[in-house]
Image: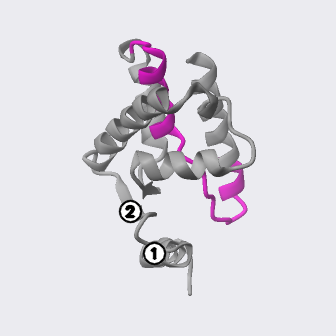
Amino acid sequence: MLLRIAVEIERTRIICRTLETGAVVVADRGVTSMRAWFDYLAVARQPFEPLLDELDGFYQGALTVVCSADFDTCWTRSTARGAQSRKDRLGPDLNRRYFEQYQGNVAALLTSGSDVVVIDTIAASVQRATEALLRAARDRGIIVP
């Protein structure tokens, strides 16, 4: 877990350097995903809460986009790729449990007061999902039309 936290800390450094150039930064999952690792690995969070709170604080004011889908859709999409990831090779039952643990962390994020946009990636086409993301970024002044 310390290595996973170190990855997130390094990510914050990269983001800070990139933002200095005036660029928009898009990062994948980050702290929400990392929080799920505690559940996956059955590691107690309490000793790490100060680090997690600091990382959460870094992202205050950032837009977080959650792409929602049900497990079966995600599993079908993931296993349809040419090569399965190491995690996919663990099978559907364990991955369903991981999915549910991740969803629990997403639920906590949604009630945290953070700026979160949820995009339904089942009902919406890729184009409509992309348009929803761009609209959210424009509405917040992150990008201009």
Amino acid carrying mark 1 in the image: Ala
**Mark identifier at residue 132:** 1
| Location of the C terminus (image quadrant) | bottom right
Residue count near mark 1 (Cα–Cα under 10 Å), binned few <14, some 14–19, many ≥20: some
Residue 53, position in %: x, y? Answer: 40, 31
* Image point (55%, 72%), residue name: 126
Which type of secondary structure does the marked residue at label 1 adopt? helix
Relative to 61, is 2 above or below?
Answer: above
Residue 34 is one of the magenta-drawn residues: yes
Distance Cα–Cα, label 1 vs label 2: 9 Å
Residue count near mark 2 (Cα–Cα under 10 Å), binned few <14, some 14–19, many ≥20: some
- Identify the residue position indicated by label 2 in the image: 117
Residue 131, position in %: x, y? Answer: 51, 79
Residue placed most toward the observer, 97 or 3: 97
Horizontal side of residue 103 vs 30, given as left or right: left
Counting every numbered tag in the picture gives: 2
Relative to 24, is 95 above or below?
Answer: above
Q: Which residues are magenta?
A: 16-44
Relative to 66, is 99 above or below?
Answer: above
Residue 32, position in %: x, y? Answer: 45, 39
Residue farthest to the left? 111
* Image point (36%, 35%), residue name: 100
* Image point (43%, 38%), residue name: 56
Quarter residue 108 falls in = top left
